[in-house]
């Protein structure tokens, strides 16, 4: 069994920040991710609110963070899935699809996954016109008519990104007001090829082999209509990737987010949680980074017990 001082599970913004601080503190640090490093921030078409970067793509920002983490001295294992945790003894055991590790301390930064709207056609056409990532799939719909569902920052940034690729973008939100930041809403409003549908719900996604139409329900006018579209981008928020943590006995809140205090401590000593998997209300790259840093500093204190922490 391989031994590490600190294992960080998840290489998104929180995990990479934790990796940087863990390694720079001198801890033998491993960061593991089931995908490539970067997390969901890497899918963000545009990031304009991470201090120091007035305009950067999520992909570029994620790449810079991963490189920084490696340079700091952390090991990053990509495409390696954690299958189980054993947190019952002082040495924490991490089982993955490749091997088994032990560590003195763990930071869980497994992030979240895209939520589905749960309408007819969504599952059937996933990957055939239904997408959850504008950056990944937008370029397939150059010059086409696409639809974005949601009223938050993800829906707004995806709409902006797609407005530069597609001929026409329809943005559909179930309420009369957006949750997205004012600045983004203003940008969306200013795009000539964007059409906004408020108080509107997507009831069904239709097609043959590929998506060809949606059924829209206007919940104010109580009217239903079918509109031709080539793609549907679902941007309605996220749910936590906390299953492994739950199975290992970590406390989670009623929505499945891991409970962590201001020091990012979980219900098990030596185990910390950071980023979108936690119950912290602000799901931002900046807050994830801050939580990752706090978790790593706390893990350092827990492992090394320096004189100033005794
Ligand atoms: P969000 O802020 O939770 O917004 C989700 C949106 O989807 C809401 O408008 C919600 O409607 C709508 N929605 C939820 N369930 C729905 C359903 N079943 N059918 C139709 N609509 C539904 O999620 P998000 O936009 O993904 O953002 C998540 C977090 O990441 C936020 O904190 C956000 O600020 C952050 N983020 C930041 C950036 C950036 O700063 N560049 C980019 C992306 C995300 P209601 O409003 O009616 O509830």
Image (cartoon, rainbow, N blue to C red):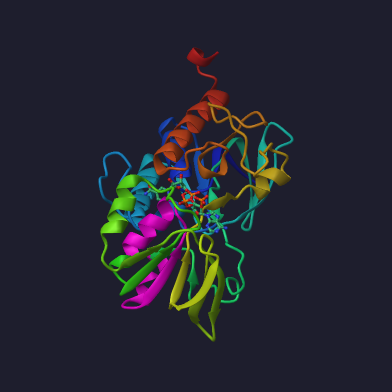
Residue 236 in percent (x, y) is at: 51, 56
Residue 67 in percent (x, y) is at: 35, 49
Judging depth in this view, the residue of 16 and 148 nearest the camera is 148
Q: Residue furthest front?
A: 221
Judging depth in this view, the residue of 243 and 171 nearest the camera is 171
Q: Which stretch appears magenta?
A: 135-161
Figure quadrant of residue 166: bottom left
Q: How many marks?
A: 0
Q: Is residue 52 visible?
A: yes
Residue 101 in percent (x, y) is at: 63, 45
Judging depth in this view, the residue of 166 and 140 nearest the camera is 166
Residue at the image point whose x is 40% and y is 72% from the top: 146
Q: Is residue 104 left or right of residue 65?
A: right
Residue at the image point whose x is 53% and y is 59% from the top: 79
Judging depth in this view, the residue of 136 and 110 nearest the camera is 136
**Above or below 53: residue 83:** below
Residue 308 in percent (x, y) is at: 48, 13
Image quadrant in which the C terminus is located: top right
Q: Is residue 215 visible?
A: no
Residue at the image point whose x is 57% and y is 38% from the top: 279
Magenta segment: does it hold 109?
A: no
Figure quadrant of residue 42: bottom left
């Amino acid at each position: 069994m391989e031994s590490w001082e600190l294992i960080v599970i998840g290489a998104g913004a929180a995990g990479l920040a934790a990796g940087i601080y863990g390694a720079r503190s001198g801890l033998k640090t491993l960061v593991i991710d089931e995908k490539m490093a970067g997390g969901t921030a890497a899918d963000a078409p545009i990031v304009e609110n991470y201090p120091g970067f007035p305009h950067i793509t999520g992909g570029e920002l994620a790449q810079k963070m991963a490189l920084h983490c490696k340079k700091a001295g952390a090991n990053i294992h990509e495409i390696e899935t954690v299958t189980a945790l054993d947190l019952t003894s002082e040495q924490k055991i991490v089982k993955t699809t490749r091997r088994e590790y032990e560590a003195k301390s763990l930071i869980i930064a497994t992030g979240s996954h895209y939520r589905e709207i749960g309408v007819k056609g969504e599952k059937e056409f996933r990957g055939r016109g239904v997408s959850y990532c504008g950056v990944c799939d937008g370029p397939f719909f150059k010059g086409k008519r696409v639809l974005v569902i949601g009223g938050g920052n993800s829906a707004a940034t995806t709409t902006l990104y797609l407005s530069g690729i597609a001929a026409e973008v329809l943005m559909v939100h179930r309420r009369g007001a957006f949750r997205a930041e004012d600045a983004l809403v203003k940008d969306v409003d200013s795009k000539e090829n964007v059409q906004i549908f408020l108080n509107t719900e997507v009831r069904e996604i239709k097609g043959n082999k590929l998506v060809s139409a949606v059924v829209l329900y206007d919940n104010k006018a109580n009217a239903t209509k079918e509109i031709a579209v080539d793609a549907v981008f679902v941007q309605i928020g996220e749910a936590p990737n906390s299953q492994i943590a739950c199975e290992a006995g970590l406390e989670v809140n009623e929505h499945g987010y891991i409970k962590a205090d201001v020091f990012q401590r979980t219900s098990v000593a030596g185990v910390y949680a950071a980023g979108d998997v936690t119950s912290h209300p602000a799901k931002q790259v900046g807050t994830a980074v801050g939580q990752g840093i706090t978790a790593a500093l706390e893990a350092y204190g827990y492992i090394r017990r320096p004189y100033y922490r005794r």
